[in-house]
Image (tube, helix red, strand yellow):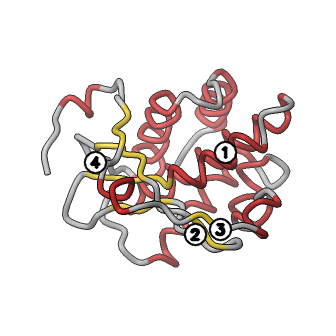
Amino acid sequence: MVTNSEILEFQEEYNSLGPEDFSGIFNSIIRIVRRFLDKSRPGILLGLVELGYDRGNFVGGFHRLGTNEIYLNKSALRVMREENSDSEEKKELYKAYLFHLLLHEYIHSINVVDERETRQLTKNISLAIFGKRHPVGKLAIFGLGAFFPYTFRQERYSPVREEILNPDFILLRHPDSEFTYI
């Protein structure tokens, strides 16, 4: 059972992180999942890849089964960052989206394959830590449509093949990330 003091620690750690701190957010998620589910996955590689979007429909990220790879949709992250950069409150929405997405994909990486189960675990953990009023909690309850910008509902972006095949990898500063394998 996760204690109230641990919940407060997770909240404080989250609040101390910047919206672009992939490594810090991911490290926090590793600790959270280890504490809530008693599982972890060493050697995760985090890549950003252009997957595009089409009028509100897109893949935010994915974990390749049988690997230690997690990929996030660079197109979605870019639009989310650009449209949520004009105030501190909106930057928090971007950070909440990144946290939500990384938590979801990391849960997949610890061998939770079923999408409904992954969504439920993501929701349970998010609400236990942040509650239903926090942006992370709202994303867990209402889904990505809760905060996604206007651009996604009106536009489309199709990356060229070279963009899809050439991910940018994020350096994760965590002891578990020192072991890389595929």
Q: Amino acid at mark 2?
A: Phe
For marks 4 and 3, the one nearer the N-term is 4
User: Which marked residue is nearer to the observer: mark 4 or mark 3?
Assistant: 3
Name the residue at 47% across, 76% down: 115
Up the image or down, 101 lies above or below 85; here it is: below
Q: Amino acid at mark 1?
A: Ile
Q: Which residue is mark 3?
A: 156
Q: Amino acid at mark 3?
A: Arg
Percent x, y of residue 42: 24, 42
Mark 1: few/some/many CA within 10 Å (<14, 14-19, 20+): many
Q: Which residue is mark 1?
A: 129
Q: Which residue is mark 2?
A: 58
Horizontal arrangement in the rendering, residue 158 relative to residue 135 (left or right)? left
Alpha carbons under labels 2 and 3: distance apart: 10 Å
Alpha carbons under labels 4 and 2: distance apart: 26 Å
Alpha carbons under labels 4 and 3: distance apart: 34 Å
For marks 4 and 1, the one nearer the N-term is 4
Name the residue at 67% across, 51% down: 128
User: Which marked residue is nearer to the observer: mark 2 or mark 1?
Assistant: 2
Percent x, y of residue 151: 77, 59
Circle 1 SS class: helix
